[in-house]
Amino acid sequence: MRTRMILAVLATALVVAACGTDSGTKPSSTGQVVSPGVLAVKLRALSVDDCFTSPATQAPKGCEKYVTEIAGTVGMVRQLAGPKLSGLNPLADTLDRSVASYRTAHCETATAPGDPCTTALTTISTTLRDVKGIIETQATTG
């Protein structure tokens, strides 16, 4: 009886230990297909942010999360770019450059509007508006 108890405890310990390791299959972020409808929803959510609606009056420090979301959205925009939506690639490039400008200038610490941070936020807003127009048209017309 004692041997069975020890074996049961050891088996349980092995199972629990195996649950905490990083080995095994992990979900891959590559290969996921983004649809115009999914991106349109994300863009609508971003377009109600104050950093989008009035970038010139925002303290750049308060737009750090917004800019991070934009940076993450650029990959989705590039994934949808193709022969039918070729205009998205230059817009994605502009978003990348503007996010880089915001980060290079350390706008996450700027407490008042002003260049170069306001310029970066304004360019992001204008470019995102253009991307949103293309994506929403594609989402509704296919």
Image: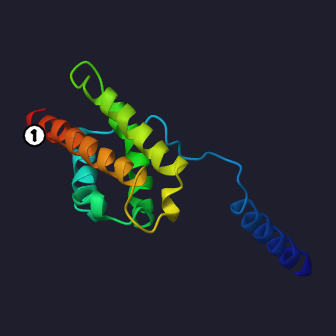
**x, y (%) of residue 6?**
88, 76
How many numbered circles does the render carry? 1
Which residue is located at x 27 percent, y 64 percent? 50
Residue nearer the viewer, 32 or 120: 120
**Residue at image location 42% in from the left, 53% down from the top:** 117
Q: Is residue 75 left or right of residue 37?
A: right
51 to the left or right of 84: right
Q: Quadrant of residue 34?
A: top left
Amino acid at circle 1: Thr
Q: Quadrant of residue 51?
A: bottom left
Query: What colour scheme has been applied to the protein in the rendered image?
Result: rainbow
| Image-based side of 105 in relation to 86, left or right | right
Q: Is residue 105 above or below residue 64?
A: above
In the current view of this chain or complex, which residue is farthest to the bottom? 2
Tell whether 54 sits left or right of 98. left
Identify which residue, 54 or 92, lies in the foreground: 54
Residue farthest to the left? 141
- Pick the quarter of the image with the N terminus: bottom right
Q: Position of residue 142 (x, y in %)?
A: 13, 32
Dot 1 crowding, Cα within 10 Å, few <14, some 14–19, many 20+? few
> Furthest-front residue in view?
114
25 or 72, which is in the foreground? 72
Residue found farthest to the top: 83
The image position of residue 91, as x and y in percent, is 31, 33
Label 1 belongs to which residue? 140
* Residue 36 x, y percent position in the rendering: 23, 39
Say what secondary structure mark 1 lies in: helix
Foreground residue among 124 and 81: 124
